[in-house]
Image (cartoon, rainbow, N blue to C red):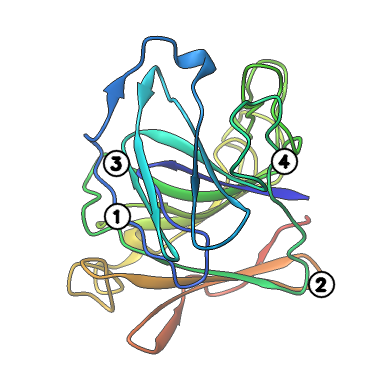
Amino acid sequence: MLLALLTAVGASILNNATTHSDFFGVRPLGSPAAYIKTTPVGNYPEGFAEESYNGYEGEISGSGHSLTVRGNVRTYWVKDVEKHDWSQIRYKALDLRGKSLRFTADVSRVGCACNAALYLVGMPSGGHGGSSGYCDIQGVGDRECLEIDLLEGNRKAIQTTLHTQTGKKADGTCNQYGCAVNWGKSSQEHYGTASMIDSGRPYEVDAAFDQDGHMTVRLGQDGTWHSCAPQRLNVID
């Protein structure tokens, strides 16, 4: 199973949800190790739990089907927002085979040197004592977890990246650096302010997974959809 996370200057994971971001909306914490803040979105028992990042507190809020993330924070999709201790937290596990995950992102205020990311990781489904138990393909301690970056970037450029193998060499495999499809790098006509996908306005992201383990990501705006990749990315291999 994969778990859904938002990090840095965030995106959203609920249908028809919009996010806004401001990298500088952070405050230092006195005791960051124990910090956790949960936020409901809509009338659901599920919601999001914020973890401090490098000793700073961000600002997250939910309104209707919208999640707003400000600051350099990591935010988890959790099963129960009434839990306020990492030892009680249970993350939302997703089996996406034969399904798609669609959300609306607003990165209009995310500038250069900032990364708004929505990604999935294969980490344990609960926190560990006084911490979130986070891991990704980069490795945390002695643990490495598979990672799929559905969307990472800003208003200038975005990419979708698979990290399905461990290791730290840039050898062309989907390890630490990943196998990426970077639309923003290929042509400014495709993505950016006033481009085919106008990053100055909200747009939709649709990540579809088939039963064979292939993933296809599309971006949509004003009722028109565009594929980010000329071919499907293989999540399994």
- The number of numbered badges drawn on the structure is 4
**Apparent side of residue 78 relative to residue 205 in the rendered image (left or right):** right
**Relative height, residue 154 to residue 65 (above, below):** above
**Horizontal and vertical percent for residue 85?**
62, 26
- Circle 2/circle 3 CB separation < 8 Å: no
What residue did someone put label 4 on? Answer: 165
Write down the residue under mark 2: 211
Residue 137 appears at what percent x and percent y? 63, 34
Report which quarter residue 188 is drawn in.
bottom left
Q: Secondary structure at mark 3?
A: loop
Classify 32 as above or below 139. Answer: above
Q: Which mark is residue 20?
A: 1
Real-space Cα distance between discs 2 and 1?
33 Å
> Around disc 1, counting alpha carbons within 10 Å, would you say few (fewer than 14), some (14 to 19), or many (20 or more)?
many
Circle 4 — which element? loop
Residue lying at the far top in this picture: please name it: 30
Residue 22 falls in image quadrant: top left
Q: Nearer the viewer, residue 73 or 197?
A: 73
On screen, residue 173 versus residue 59, left or right, reads right
Q: Where residue 72 is drawn, which disc sits there?
A: none
Is label 2 in a helix, a strand or a loop?
Answer: loop
The mark nearer the N terminus, 2 or 1, is: 1
Which mark, residue 114?
3
- Earlier residue among tags 3 and 1: 1
- Name the side, left or right, on which 173 lies relative to 1: left
Q: CA distance from mark 2 to mark 3?
A: 34 Å
